[in-house]
Amino acid sequence: MKRSAMLFGLLLGGPLLLSPLLAPVPAAAQAPPALTYAQPLGPEAVNRVQDRLRQAGAYSGRVDGIWGPDSQTALERYQQRNGLQVTGQLNQATATVLGLNPADLVGGPPGPAPAASAETLSEAVVRNVQGRLRSLGFYRSGVDGIWGPTTQAAIEQFQQGRGLQPNGQLTPATAAAMGLDPNNLAAPAR
């Protein structure tokens, strides 16, 4: 699993995503792999974490609600500076030292929402999505407002890189992860 594709999460109980941690062990001494539980954070929670990391002097990037390599490195740097176990994940100990309440960061489960279909997206919305994907480094073609295979492939790559289901559809979760308002896809990115 690529480092940039790792899920950012909190170690909490409840219905969460499972991710095995595999370590090379001799076959004779091999025990079942340990499991960690990760709850992806929404853009507002990521904003709060990025802001706290910035206040602590560990993060100099933009507070944009998108967890990327700079945020990951800042979290690891913060953990190391503060004598915490350097896990690269926002666990309860790290959240507490940052002055954040883990329960406040993880919202309730989102209700199912439909994906936007290519047939229902206006040219302005497609331009906005293409521009956002381009600014995030996932789209290299012209911002033309036409939903085609290149745009769909960029959405899939973005989804895969953010630990989302890579289906090429512009779901509310995908739009939010891109920093777009799922209720107003034509609005500028946050």
Image (cartoon, grey):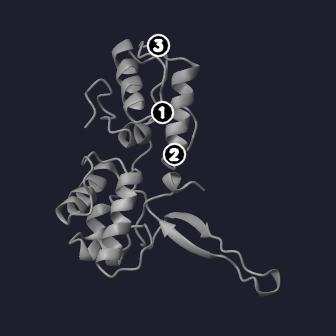
SS assignment at label 1:
loop
Quarter where residue 131 is shown: top left
Q: Nearer the viewer, mark 3 or mark 2?
A: 2
Give the labeled residue for mark 3. 146
Q: CA distance from mark 2 to mark 1?
A: 10 Å
Amino acid on which the number 1 mark rests in the picture = Phe
SS assignment at label 2:
helix
Amino acid on which the number 2 mark rests in the picture = Gly
Q: CA distance from mark 3 to mark 1?
A: 16 Å
Mark closer to the chain start, 3 or 2: 3
Residue 177 badge:
none
Residue 161 badge:
2
Q: Is residue 90 above or below residue 133?
A: below
Residue farthest toward the bottom in the current orientation of the protein? 29
Quarter where residue 86 is shown: bottom left
Give the labeled residue for mark 1. 138
Q: Nearer the viewer, mark 3 or mark 1?
A: 1
Q: Is residue 100 above or below residue 6?
A: below
Q: CA distance from mark 3 to mark 2?
A: 23 Å
- For the residues labelled 2 and 1, say whether their Cβ atoms are less than 8 Å apart: yes
The residue positioned 32% from the left and 35% from the top of the image is 180
Near-viewer residue (92 or 75): 75
The residue positioned 25% from the left and 28% from the top of the image is 188
Q: In the figure, is residue 22 to the left or right of 28?
A: left
Image quarter hosting the N terminus: bottom right
Q: Is residue 86 above or below residue 188?
A: below
